């Protein structure tokens, strides 16, 4: 194990951003695959927000050095959430010797949480 990261977010915070900023917010944070999968479900969007933050924390950078869209949450062949890295996030993972990121997501009506282990 190289690092861990965890994040929790209030689903109302994500709903508020979607309501206030609409497509501009969604396209700044999420990839087209994520948007298609979530299909407007706030809990799923919030869980992916938390996952992106948790991955960035595992890198030791937070969001900034890597962008939200550089960290993508997809479903693997078993329909489990998995992380796909793009651009600066993929480069940073390579520099840090991170080859695998395990991800667990959960959400309720009020909160979403993500936990990652970088190996």
Image (cartoon, rainbow, N blue to C red):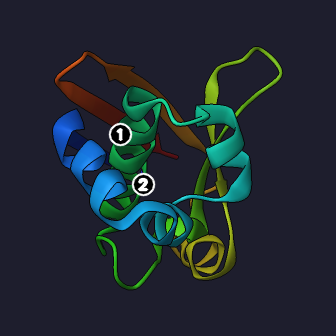
Location of mark 1 (residue): 46
Mark linked to residue 108: none
Nearer to me, 38 or 49: 38
C-alpha separation, residue under disc 2 versus residue under disc 1: 10 Å
Q: Is residue 65 above or below residue 59?
A: below
Q: Kindly identify the residue that appears in the image at 63 percent across and 47 percent down.
A: 35
Q: Residue furthest right?
A: 77
Q: Is residue 19 above or below residue 56?
A: above
Q: Is residue 28 above or below residue 98?
A: below
Residue 66 visible: yes
Residue 4, quarter of the rendered image: top left
Residue 1 visible: no
Q: Is residue 10 above or below residue 16?
A: above
Location of mark 2 (residue): 52
Q: Kindly identify the residue that appears in the image at 29 percent across and 70 percent down.
A: 62
Q: Is residue 110 left or right of residue 77?
A: left
Percent x, y of residue 50 = 33, 45
The secondary structure type at the circle numbered 2 is helix
Q: Is residue 38 left or right of residue 20?
A: right
Foreground disc of the pair 2, 1: 1
Q: Quick one: label 2 or label 1, which is nearer the N terminus?
A: 1
Residue 93, quarter of the rendered image: bottom right
Percent x, y of residue 63 = 33, 73
Q: Is residue 84 left or right of residue 117?
A: right
**Tags 2 and 1 touching, CB below 8 Å:** no
Nearer to me, 11 or 118: 11
Nearer to me, 91 or 106: 106
């Amino acid at each position: 194990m190289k690092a861990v990261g965890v994040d929790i977010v209030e689903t109302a915070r994500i709903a508020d951003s979607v309501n206030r900023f609409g497509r501009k917010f969604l396209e700044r944070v999420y990839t087209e695959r994520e948007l298609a999968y979530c299909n407007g479900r706030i809990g799923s969007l919030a869980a992916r927000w938390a996952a992106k933050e948790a991955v960035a924390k595992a890198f030791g950078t937070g969001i900034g050095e890597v962008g939200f869209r550089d960290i993508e949450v997809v479903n693997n062949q078993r329909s489990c959430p998995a992380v796909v890295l793009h651009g600066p996030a993929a480069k940073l993972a390579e520099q840090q010797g991170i080859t695998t990121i395990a991800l667990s997501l959960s959400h309720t009506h009020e909160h979403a949480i993500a936990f990652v282990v970088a190996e």
